[in-house]
Amino acid sequence: MTLPQRKTMAAHFGIRIVSAERHKVVGELDAGERHLNNRGIVHGGAYMAFADDVGGMTARLNIADEMTTTTLESKSNFFRASPPGTLTAVSVPVHVGRRTVVVQTQIFAADGKLAAMVTQTQLVIPRAAKT
């Protein structure tokens, strides 16, 4: 699969999609100063933005072309603090239905240890007609 060049919040944030298949999407984020909280560790919001982007792509790969998704709900568990470094997100579909897709995204710190897990529900909706 050829991944499109992204000019979105994800690109601004530095999120890279490493591989993208229906059953699993893998992304990377080089967490630097702009991703840290005032204690010098990766901000919880950075984890959430990373997971939402990678999870959203996972959902999108599992629906029809004439449909799109939007995040309906997101739940996070933070397991450990992450210093700056390359984070890896692995997202898999848990449920693929006609109206919702549920994905689970694990985020690993640079040392390979699980740092966070995000479960999100994506609402499946028709794409807006282009005018």
Image (cartoon, rainbow, N blue to C red):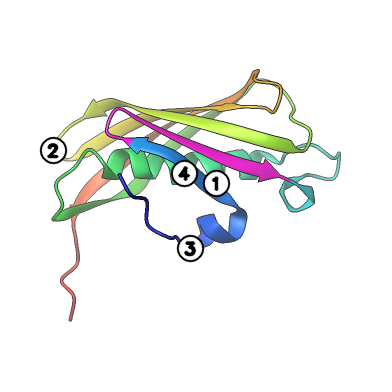
Q: Which mark is residue 8?
A: 3
**Residue under label 2:** 98
Residue 122 lies, in percent from the top left, at 31, 41
Residue at (63% x, 44% y) in the render: 46
Residue placed under numbered mark 4 in the picture: 17
Q: Which residues are magenta?
A: 21-31
Residue 80 relative to residue 125: left or right: right
Badge 4 or badge 2: first in the primary sequence: 4
Tell me the kind of residue under disc 3. Thr
Give the mark nearer the N terminus: 2 vs 3: 3
Query: Quick one: SS at disc 2?
Result: loop
Q: Is residue 111 above or below residue 96?
A: above
Q: Quadrant of the C terminus?
A: bottom left
Report the mark closest to the observer, 4 or 2.
4
Are there few (<14), some (14-19), or many (20+) residues within 10 Å of tag 2?
Answer: few
Give the amino acid type for the residue marked by disc 4 in the picture. Answer: Ile
Crowd rating for badge 3 (residues with CA inside 10 Å; few <14, some 14–19, many 20+): few
Q: Which mark is residue 120?
A: none
